[in-house]
Image: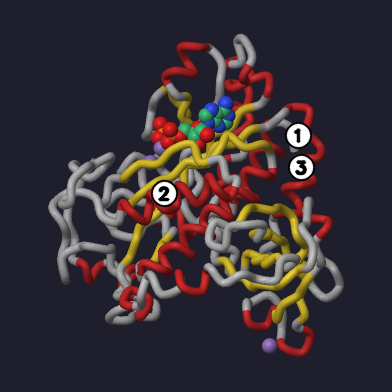
Amino acid sequence: ADNSHSKIEDNPKILSGPVLTNSPNAVLSKTLLGRYYDLPLPEDRILATYIWIDGTGEHLRCKDRTLNFIPKAPKDLPIWNFDGSSTGQSDGHNSDTFLYPRALYKDPFRRGNHILVMCDTYKYNMEPTETNHRLKCQDAYDKCKEDEPWFGIEQEYILLDSDLRPFGWPPGGFPPPQGPYYCGVGANKVFARDLVEAHYRCCLFAGIPICGTNAEVMPSQWEFQVGPSVGVNAADDLWVARYLLHRLAEEYGVIVSFDPKPVQDWNGSGAHTNFSTKKMREENGIIEIEKAIDKLSKVHMKHIRVYDPRGGKDNERRLTGLHETASINDFSAGVANRGSSIRIPRSVAVDKKGYLEDRRPASNCDPYAVVDALMRTCILNE
Ligand code: ADP
Ligand code: MN
Ligand code: MN
Ligand code: MN
Ligand code: MN
């Protein structure tokens, strides 16, 4: 890692946006709600939080409703709507935008039979909205189900204070250079571990297969890994894991940023996407892995365009060739190489079977678009 320092003023990304000196949430009582959580609700009432991706393709919205039955599957739930003109998803004179329930999770905040509902969005004429990449992803998965595509996504992120600077960083300056923070232990190395722990537990309770977590290279930067999950479900799982993280951070009065390069000259944040098919996981699956890498090498820029919400613009800041990344302009692959676009983990090379790691997706990518692109290039040969 290289540790050159620039001035904090050189980081417009951190300094832009609505700045509060102190999040009001940080000072609210953390125990008061306990008094009301115990209130018995009418027995046949279920609270459902509908969650969706807004017009930025990057941020989430949610709203709640009461049901009078326990839904078993997404199709049991009512289609709902919202004001798309307030989320960048329609204009004001035709603003009703539809929410289609797609995946159910247990609600770790309300517990009981209460649920979280991941939805995708449709315009007044039932066309998918511009940021609905789920529909296409489901279609790709339906066409390659027999190949059993699995995805495991490593979600990196950073916590910000309400002034939008990294949480716990010294006012107006930088912490000592990166080195001791990655997988660090100790109050001067890692910040907000209790939030990370709460998130881990909430995800597992909800039904999201979190398989690990670790502190990352920048202080207040963390990672969690989801999966392996099958096809489009991997992306549902990651979006709801992101929702839970935002929702928990709300309580702590800190802000989660999935920006792929929050601080210049320090490691950025990615969403490494680990991918395998049934054949790749079988004896000598390395041959299939190499075939997939060959296909990926031919459509590098096509993938870069869908690996962040701004057609590659966000990843331009991150994929510089430094800080454990490959240049955005070149495709490369290698065993155990963290400076390449695609890495074959050492253990996979030794076993001659397993999975590949696509290191290019940005931390703020839409996993529906990433999973879709990988299935279409590597399995469907599109
Ligand atoms: P790294 O060494 O790149 O930091 P991590 O341990 O953070 O690796 O993440 C490994 C990821 O690989 C996890 O998300 C896990 O679910 C995923 N994974 C493991 N096996 C497979 C597989 N066969 N197919 C797809 N993903 C897999
Ligand atoms: Mn209203
Ligand atoms: Mn990792
Ligand atoms: Mn990492
Ligand atoms: Mn990785």
Up the image or down, 214 lies above or below 40; here it is: above
Q: Secondary structure at mark 1?
A: loop
Callout 2 secondary element: strand
Residue pictured at 53% horizontal, 52% vertical: 241
Q: Nearer the viewer, mark 2 or mark 1?
A: 2
Question: Foreground: 300 or 90?
Answer: 90
Query: Is 106 or 375 nearer to us in this picture?
Result: 106
| Residue with the mark numbered 3 | 140
Q: Position of residue 2 (x, y in %)?
A: 21, 44
Query: Quadrant of the rendered structure where residue 229 is?
Result: top right
Total residue callouts: 3
User: Residue 239 at what x, y percent from top left?
Assistant: 58, 54
Mark 1 Cβ inside 8 Å of ligand 1: no
Expressed as whole percent of the image width and height from the top left, the position of residue 215 reads 31, 45
Q: Which residue is mark 2?
A: 156
Question: To which residue does mark 1 refer?
Answer: 380
Give the camera-side residue of 175 and 286. Answer: 175
Cα separation, mark 2 vs mark 1, equals: 29 Å
Q: Is residue 345 left or right of residue 353?
A: left
Q: Secondary structure at mark 3?
A: helix
Residue drawn where x is 68% and y is 19% of the image: 279
* Residue furthest left in the image: 176
10 Å crowding of disc 3: few (<14), some (14-19), many (20+): many
Amino acid type assigned to the residue bearing label 3 in the image = Ala
> Going by the image, does 243 lie left or right of 178?
right
Q: Is residue 53 above or below residue 305?
A: below
Quarter of the figure with residue 216 = top left
Q: Is residue 46 left or right of residue 338?
A: right
- Mark 1 touches mark 3? (CB < 8 Å): yes
Does label 2 or label 1 sit earlier along the sequence? 2
Question: Is residue 356 in view?
Answer: no
